[in-house]
Amino acid sequence: MNTKSLFASIVLMLGLSAAPVMATPLNLNLAETPDIVSSFLSVNYDSIAQVLTVDGFATQLDLDGIAPGDMITDVVGGTNPGLFNLTATVDNAGVFQSGSFSIFGSVLGAAPTTLISGILTAMGTDVSTLEFLFGVTGGSYEATFGGIGAIGGIIISQLDDNLTADWTADFASSSFSVQADTAAMPAPEPGILFLQGLGLLMLIGLRRRGTK
């Protein structure tokens, strides 16, 4: 993305940042690669703490679009999968506030480490789907996902129908078929440029806090 486009997206973000991020479908169109598949996810919402957590197993990394992808394990040469973890603050009106995620594991014989991590910048919901946009913050596959500040997406599917319909009460998934795709985004569109600027500003803010 060129400097003018990034500047424009940041200016737009500053003008709209006070608007609530309502939980409506994002209708994400993820890139085919890179894509990390996670399975057997547990989705839980604590309505008092207003915290949504998604935990499970990272199983495959697809870098070329040819199935099957490379296996993700917890240790080099292991048989157990890697780990997927996502935490988000969502108020009782279903308005997304903030969040982060990370995926940990070993791929292609490399020592187990964080493969990709990010700050969540937007959330969407549908009947049986959760969607998130994120800004890349690190990980051994950071460059593959476009580098620090690049925008990616997470689609969590096969939830219980209408699981996220009521944010005033606790809820938890009961299905063992819940899975997630964590992937890069195609060439940026205006809306994605806006969110990319938002992600970059959030990264800058976090780094400044870390230096104090």
Image (spheres, rainbow, N blue to C red):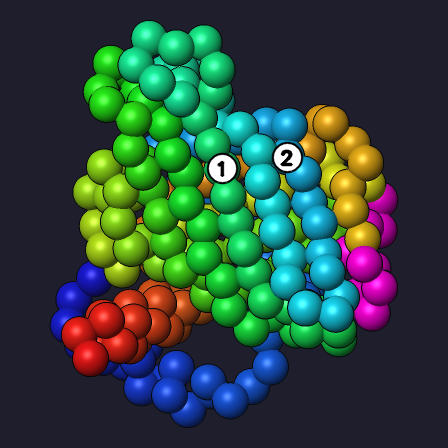
Please report the residue visible at 63 percent of the width from the left and 34 percent of the height from the top.
Answer: 41
The residue nearer to you, when weighing 8 against 72, is 72
Tell me: residue 164, above or below residue 112. below
| Residue 41 tag number | 2
Query: Residue 67's spot in the image, x, y percent?
Result: 44, 13
Name the quadrant of the N terminus: bottom left
Amino acid identity at mark 1 = Phe
Point out the stretch of residues depicted in magenta: 161-170
Amino acid identity at mark 2 = Leu
Query: Residue 179's spot in the image, x, y percent?
Result: 62, 32
Can residue 211 be spotted in the picture? yes
Left or right of 2 on screen, residue 152: right
Please report the residue visible at 49 percent of the width from the left and 37 percent of the height from the top.
Answer: 84
Please report the residue visible at 33 percent of the width from the left and 8 percent of the height from the top.
Answer: 77
Asked if the stretch drawn in magenta spans residue 179, the answer is no
Can residue 144 be spotted in the picture? no
Closer to the chain start, of discs 2 and 1, is 2
State the residue position of label 1: 84
Tell me, yes or no, whether the two marked residues, 2 and 1, touch with CB atoms within 8 Å.
yes
Query: Residue 42's spot in the image, x, y percent?
Result: 67, 38
